């Protein structure tokens, strides 16, 4: 039998989840009132791609767990997915390789995440749209005016800030990336940096950084939610938008602006080679016995112990594989300045550990930190409820009075 302390604690958690559920319902009702009509019926889109209702329900259960929500939220997650095509998105391309967009577009067997990304109301995306020059510029302004204060601004790419931003000019009027980013982010409901370039500067900002490239927040002082990765996993973008549709708010983040639900744990903590790491069984050379038997890649330069991301859990290409599974170590691409701090790519950096992180001596500590972060994620949901409780109550009253 559990102690009375346990039952008090469980009661408190249940109460917080009830409050969160109430808040979620009010937030979704409000969102549905404000968003434009659906562009695509999700059930039709799923049918077109051959995804059964059963698979969609399975997917919504997985996403509910991934977002650190209790299973009672599954129907709400499914409802949020149905609203995906109502979310206006303006997608900017700055200094980058378009690899993030490519990664989202290239799946050969689309799963529910891919289908959702296809249904998004993309009002402006330079790589995908047909318009160019003045017409593209017009489209951008039309989208900003039509959805003023309601669109999500997604930015792919860093901003070169040297020479007043003149290393990157865009469009027929030769505006700098700095100008365009400031203009579009200032009228958005929320700003998301997709990929490591817009999150932290990435390779454009690697030493010696001749253009003084920076991530969006550092370059223009606008706080963005960061979904780093080179490229990031589409699931992390889909999940973040789902969260937004559920709570009319972006998810809680770590100190680097990364959503805790996706970046709250180290790659190393969920790696399928972790048992070999703990047992001291390492690949010492490409093609050796360890490589054939799937041992740990730490000595071949894997940066999983330093890197916060969920790649080992969600994988890529319809959850088929990820770099460590394919036989190459993690290169730490979700961390700021990884080109400078995680190099050399195929050797360990144990001789110069990152601040506060040892490796062999700190495996348990890493576990404790990860547990702490997961708890922080739940606490942040609950905290958001408490903070928003008043407005939720007010909104409910307002609804009741209608
Ligand atoms: S060091 Fe890399 S390969 Fe080894 S267990 Fe950690 S993440 Fe996996």
Image (spheres, grey):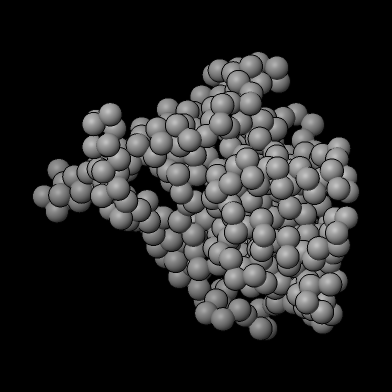
Q: How many marks?
A: 0
Q: Residue at x 61, y 31 (%)?
A: 85
For the question of whether residue 316 can be seen, the reply is: no
In percent of width and height, residue 137 lies at 80, 49
Q: Is residue 40 above or below residue 86?
A: above
Coordinates of residue 347 in the picture (x, y in percent):
77, 73
| Quadrant of the frame with the C terminus | top left
Q: What residue is at 64 percent from the left and 23 percent from the top? A: 40
Residue at position x 58%, y 52% from top? 188
Question: Which quadrant of the structure image shows residue 225?
Answer: bottom right
In the picture as drawn, the residue positioned furthest to the left comes out as 4
Q: Answer above or below: position of 39 versus 209.
A: above
The residue at 32%/51% (across/down) is 388
Foreground of the two, 350 or 21: 21
In the picture, measured across the screen, residue 177 lies left or right of residue 281, that is right
Q: Position of residue 185 (x, y in %)?
A: 62, 57
Q: Is residue 252 visible?
A: yes
Q: Is residue 393 above or below residue 340?
A: above
Front position in the image: 361 or 32: 32
Quadrant holding the N terminus: top left
Left or right of 13? Residue 1 is left
Across and down, in percent, residue 354 comes to 61, 79
Of residues 215 and 378, the one nearer the viewer is 215
Quarter of the rendering containing residue 273: bottom right
């Amino acid at each position: 039998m559990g102690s009375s302390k346990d039952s008090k604690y469980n009661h408190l958690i249940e109460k917080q989840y009830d409050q969160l559920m109430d808040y979620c319902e009010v937030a979704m009702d409000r969102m549905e009132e404000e968003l434009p009509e659906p562009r695509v019926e999700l059930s039709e889109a799923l049918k077109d791609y051959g995804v059964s209702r059963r698979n969609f329900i399975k997917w919504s259960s997985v996403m509910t767990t991934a977002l650190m929500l209790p299973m009672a939220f599954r129907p709400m997650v499914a409802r949020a997915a149905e609203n995906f095509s109502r979310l206006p998105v303006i997608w900017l391309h700055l200094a980058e390789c378009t690899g993030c967009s490519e990664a989202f577009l290239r799946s050969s067997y689309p799963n529910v995440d891919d289908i959702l990304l296809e249904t998004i109301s993309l009002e402006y995306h330079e790589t995908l749209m047909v318009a160019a020059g003045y017409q593209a510029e017009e489209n951008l302004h039309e989208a900003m005016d039509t959805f003023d204060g309601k669109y999500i601004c997604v930015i792919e790419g860093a901003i070169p800030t040297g020479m007043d931003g003149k290393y990157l000019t865009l469009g027929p009027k030769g505006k700098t990336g700095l100008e365009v980013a400031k203009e579009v982010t200032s009228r958005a409901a929320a700003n998301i940096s997709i990929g490591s370039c817009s999150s932290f500067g990435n390779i454009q900002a690697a030493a010696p950084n001749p253009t003084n490239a920076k991530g969006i927040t550092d370059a223009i002082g606008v706080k963005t939610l960061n979904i780093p990765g080179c490229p990031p996993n589409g699931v992390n973008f889909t999940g973040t938008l789902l969260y937004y549709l559920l709570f009319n708010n972006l998810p809680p983040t770590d100190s680097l602006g990364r959503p805790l639900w996706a970046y709250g744990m180290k790659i190393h903590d969920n790696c399928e080679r972790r048992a070999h790491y703990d047992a001291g069984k390492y690949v010492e050379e490409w093609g050796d016995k360890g490589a054939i038997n799937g041992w740990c890649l730490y000595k071949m330069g894997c940066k999983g112990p330093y890197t916060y991301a969920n790649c080992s859990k969600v994988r890529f290409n319809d959850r088929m594989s990820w770099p460590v599974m394919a036989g190459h170590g993690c290169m730490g691409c979700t961390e700021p300045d990884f080109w400078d701090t995680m190099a050399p790519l195929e050797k360990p950096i144990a001789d110069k550990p990152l601040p506060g992180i040892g490796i062999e001596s700190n495996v348990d500590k890493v576990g404790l930190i990860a547990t702490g972060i997961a708890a922080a994620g739940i606490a942040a949901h609950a905290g958001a409820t408490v903070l928003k409780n008043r407005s939720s109550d007010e909104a409910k009253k307002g609804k009741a009075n209608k």
